[in-house]
Image (cartoon, rainbow, N blue to C red):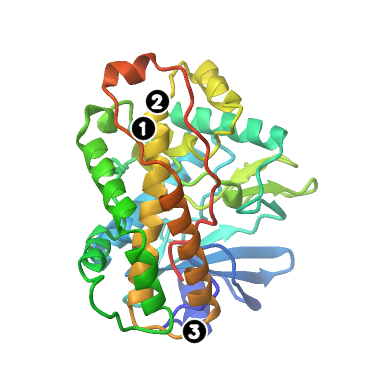
Amino acid sequence: MKDRPAGVTERDLVHALADGWGLPVETLRYAPVGGGSYHWVVTSGPGEQWFVTVDDLDDKGWLGRTRLAVFAGLRAALDASVTLRRETGLRFVAAPVPALDGRSLRPLGDAHTVAVFPFLHGTPGEWDKPLPAPDLDELLAMLAALHGVDPAAVRLQRREAGLSWRDDLELALRELGRPWTGGPFTEPARELLAGAAGPVRRGLDALDRWARSPAAAANLVITHGEPHPGNIIRVAADGADGADGVGPASGAIMLIDWDTVGLAPPERDLWMIATEADAELRRYTELTGRPVDSTAIELYRLRWDLDDLSCFIRDLRAPHRRTPGTEHAWQVLQTIITQITTHPIPVLRPAAARATETDICPVYPIRPASTKL
């Protein structure tokens, strides 16, 4: 996040880290990276470095509509990451360090949460840069291992194929004929959405048909939700083990940002690693024995675009100023609209046809995953 969270001071954060984790903060540096959460790099002593994440309970629509629901959903997601790392042996899971009371995250005031992660010394991936073939192979093996874990090992709900802020997007579509007020990017956002209203509505209809189909609830596995290059870190060759004593091997890949973890068909993850050669999806089938549903791959790609659209339209219709965060939102919104208007809407075929299909769907570029300003 480029902009800092409103209503959270560094003094608040220092007190939360001392009370919750017993960390005596020596230095605190805001890190304007990623999307959807706020981050600080913290040192608490010689050689002790942490990555601290603050989340806004009003800005995670996929977890719920109330602060209590979002807190519960976020805690369940982070608890699941701790279980996956410590109890099922998935060492590539970048899980938080439990607080002194054993919780994976703690409240920070009324509207935020805070979690602490080991600082990973290494090289992060880039949103718009494809992974090298060896890294892609490693990520594929990681997803196969994750999808092979018994869902009963974690307490997670099924992750529906719906949108974070569907109601807000529907309202925006109904109000395209009147001026929008909110800030410098509000009217440009209205004009942009007006030009894409047809494809957006057809995309929403396609998602609705998919959500009602048996395939949407079949073959549920534990999915990460966003295994794109921006959520990959290759640990430095001299990287130390994590705080739990079973950290990643030197040079290993770590998968970060587990707040989107949930039960879903494997295609929820797989569409992000598919290349035009489709060798990755064939290899996945070899590793797991699971065929890949090409229609589901296309629909999860569409769902990604529409979900980001719902988030950015909501943000840019709200009162705002011109900031690095809102400028970023406007730029990404233009990319989203281009994706939706230039790629065909998937056609939901009968289950029998999908089961016998061997072709792999077209591959679309992955945009920086930032659903918040």
Mark carried by residue 293: 2
Q: Is residue 185 above or below residue 351?
A: below
Left or right? Give the position of 78 relative to 168: right
Q: Vertically, is 52 above or below 281?
A: below
- Depth check: give the residue in front, 276 or 74: 276
Q: Residue at x 40, y 41 (%)?
A: 344
Q: Secondary structure at mark 2?
A: loop
- Residue 78 seen from this side: no
**Camera-nearest residue between 183 and 50:** 183
Secondary structure under tag 3 reads loop
Residue at 52% x, 44% y: name it: 227
Label 3 and label 2: CA atoms lie apart by: 42 Å
Foreground residue, 288 or 23? 288
Give residue 254's position: percent from left, percent from top: 62, 45
- Please indicate whether residue 147 sits to the left or right of residue 47 in the image: left
Marks 1, 2: nearer the viewer: 2
Relative depth, front residue between 327 and 59: 327
Q: Residue 265: which numbered mark, if any? A: 1
Residue 16 horizontal/vertical position (percent): 46, 75
Compared across the picture, whether 42 is left or right of 367 comes to right
- The local secondary structure at tag 1 comes to loop
Say what amino acid the circle numbered 1 marks: Pro
Badge number at residue 322: 3
The residue lying at 51 percent from left, 54 percent from top is 96
Q: Image quarter for residue 64?
A: bottom left
Image quarter of residue 292: top left
